[in-house]
Image (spheres, helix red, strand yellow):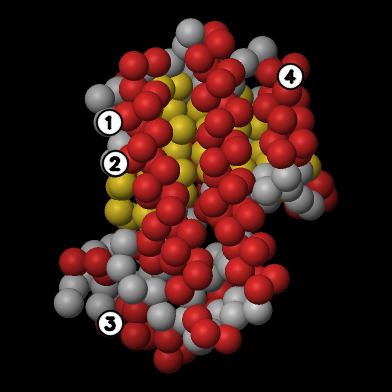
Amino acid sequence: MSSLFSLEGRVAIITGASRGIGEAIAVRFAEHGAKVVLVARKPDALNGVVAKLPKGQALAVPGHTGKAEDVKAVVKAAIDAFGKVDVLVNNAAANPYFGPMLDIEDSAWDKTFEVNVRGYFMMMREVARHLVERNAPGSLINVASIAGLRAAPLQAVYGMTKAAVLSMVQSLSQELGSANIRVNAIAPGLVDTKFASAIVQNDDLRKQVVARTSLGRHAQPDEMAGAAVFLASDASSYVTGQVLVVDGGTTITV
């Protein structure tokens, strides 16, 4: 393995790691040598992912990233187990409502912002403070969405939260650059996950997306993992404040 993409000696926290994109990133990080701390709300699902990884290389920490006490507990558990944190992958997300923006209930709005914006910020803040205290370089990676880059009909509030994530990435990258902490985002297109099932499992909606995607198909979760490995490794040592779009060419179409 090229040392440029090696994650040997690094410890990564990955949220939303019990399935889909988060699980795929955890598997690839472990393959590249990282110790991984997997976070999600369902312990059984997390333990199932840990069982697939080399013994002693992964830790499951159940938690809700929208709650400050859980965020602090996650980072503490990672440090207690592996001595430090070098990389954060913010991937946990919520999208409880799919439909016209004007019809969303306040509770669904609040949940979407709690996890997708508040949770991402609190995780980055906690890990960044740890890195600054250690005077150590680090990489904060945020799984956003192309819904944060353009109109997102039927999932507009979700799109708003992802646009907010991209704004955080830009601002924090400038504030943390002098500490050698890089902050970036990955913006996936349509990926075959349970999270995106409202589109993937709807033939009409899926065909509409695929028809305007250059590669003529939707993605699989593992196709997002390479971008995360790149942003976590020394291969991206001069990359910060950026949005890496991984959408098969969807956003370049009219």
Indicate the secondary structure of the residue bearing disc 4. Answer: helix
Which residue is at 68% across, 27% downward?
75
Q: Looking at the image, which is closer to me, 40 or 8?
A: 40
Please name the residue that numbered disc 2 is placed on.
242
Label 1 neighbour load within 10 Å: few <14, some 14-19, many 20+: some
Q: Nearer the viewer, mark 4 or mark 2?
A: 2
Which residue is at 32% across, 29% downward?
174
Tell me the kind of residue under disc 2: Gln
Please name the residue that numbered disc 1 is placed on.
239
Quarter of the view holding residue 176: top left
The N terminus is located in which quarter?
top left
Left or right position of 250 against 46: left
Separation of marks 1 and 2 at Cα, in angstroms: 7 Å
Indicate the secondary structure of the residue bearing disc 3. Answer: helix
Place of residue 183 in the rendered image (x, y in percent of width and height, measured from the top left): 39, 33
Tell me the kind of residue under disc 4: Ala
Cβ–Cβ below 8 Å for labels 1 and 2? Answer: yes
Which residue is at 34% across, 16% downward?
178
Please name the residue that numbered disc 3 is placed on.
211
Tell me the kind of residue under disc 1: Val
Indicate the secondary structure of the residue bearing disc 2. Answer: loop
Tell me the kind of residue under disc 3: Ala
Q: Looking at the image, which is closer to me, 133 or 28?
A: 133
Please name the residue that numbered disc 4 is placed on.
81
Separation of marks 3 and 4 at Cα, in angstroms: 47 Å
Q: Nearer the viewer, mark 3 or mark 1?
A: 1
Place of residue 65 in the rendered image (x, y in percent of width and height, measured from the top left): 67, 45
Separation of marks 2 and 3 at Cα, in angstroms: 27 Å
Q: Residue furthest top?
A: 135
The earlier-in-sequence mark between 3 and 4 is 4
